[in-house]
Image: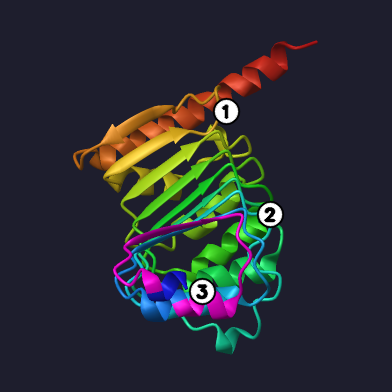
Amino acid sequence: MLANGCKRLVKLELSGCEGSYDGISAIGRCCLMLEELTICDHRMDGGWMAAVSFCENLKTLRLQGCKKIDTDAGPEEHLGSCPTIERLQLQRCQLRDKRSLRALFMVCESVREIMFQDCWGLDDEMFRITSICRWVKFLSLEGCSLLTTEGLESIILSWKDLQRLIVISCDKVKDDEVTSALANLFSVLKELKWRPDSKSVLAMSLAGTGIGKKGARFFRKQSLQGRQQSKRKAEEDP
């Protein structure tokens, strides 16, 4: 009924809704102008994720407060993909099911922007699933307490198109674990917001493209100073 009655719909938010593959596919088939879909704390039946591919003009997919992504995403060969999706945003979601998270990123494999905010269960293994997306230009991580520096680096170094990076309140991402390869990446980004914790000595916001090699040297120097300070403190402690 919603799909047939609102054919010129551009934005849609479904909050606490029950639904299924049939409902989402109907929205995709009928609401041809839909560009932004937000799903909050859903109670949908398993298999709904495969229907997102029917939303042929969708640009933004946002999941908020979801305790699950998809309880039964089905065979990967039946998922399809939605190549028009540019932004995938996950806020306050439970990300403990590897299979359903993989299904989500397969459907959204062409995204240019990925955001994780205060999501539970996003450890290194789960974050590696984002490698399905090969053309990411913008990554934002906030409140991802399980992700480590190594886990972050293993993925973003493979994203050759990455231009903007935000890392805020991710306690296991450490300044003194920033490698030279990661520092070099930081130096060429158009935008960097790096505040993984309140003690970060690299905490700053960088914008513009004039950072170059000087930026890489700065990060290596600061990382070295952080290690030296930790060593001196350990020697001074009884």
Q: Which residues are magenta?
A: 5-26
Q: Is 104 placed left or right of 32 in the picture?
A: right
Residue receiving disc 1: 227
Viewer-side residue, 144 vs 80? 80
Kindly identify which residue carries mark 3: 24
Observer-nearest of 2 and 158: 2
How far is the residue under mark 3 from the one under mark 1?
52 Å
The mark lying in front, picked from 3 and 1, is 3
Q: Residue at x 34, y 67 (%)?
A: 34
What's the amino acid at mark 3?
Ile
- Residue type, label 1: Arg
Counting the numbered discs, the total is: 3
**Closer to us: mark 1 or mark 2?**
2
At a point 63% along the width and 38% down the height, the residue shown is 172
Q: Residues within 10 Å of mark 1 (few under 14, many from 20)?
A: some
Can residue 222 be seen in this snapshot?
Answer: yes
In this rendering, position of residue 20 left or right of residue 139 = right
In the figure, 125 relative to 204: above or below? below
Residue wearing tag 2 = 67
Q: How far across and down, in percent of the image, does residue 140 sit? A: 44, 46
- Residue 10 magenta-highlighted: yes
Mark 3: give few (<14), some (14-19) or many (20+) Cα within 10 Å.
many
- 44, 213: nearer the viewer: 44
Q: SS at mark 1? A: helix
* Image height of 216 relative to 54, above or below: above
Judged left or right of residue 59, residue 70 is right
Along the line of sight, the residue nearer the viewer: 94 or 9: 9
Residue at position x 38%, y 28% in the image: 204
Question: How far apart in space, not on screen, are marks 1 and 2 (Cα)?
Answer: 39 Å
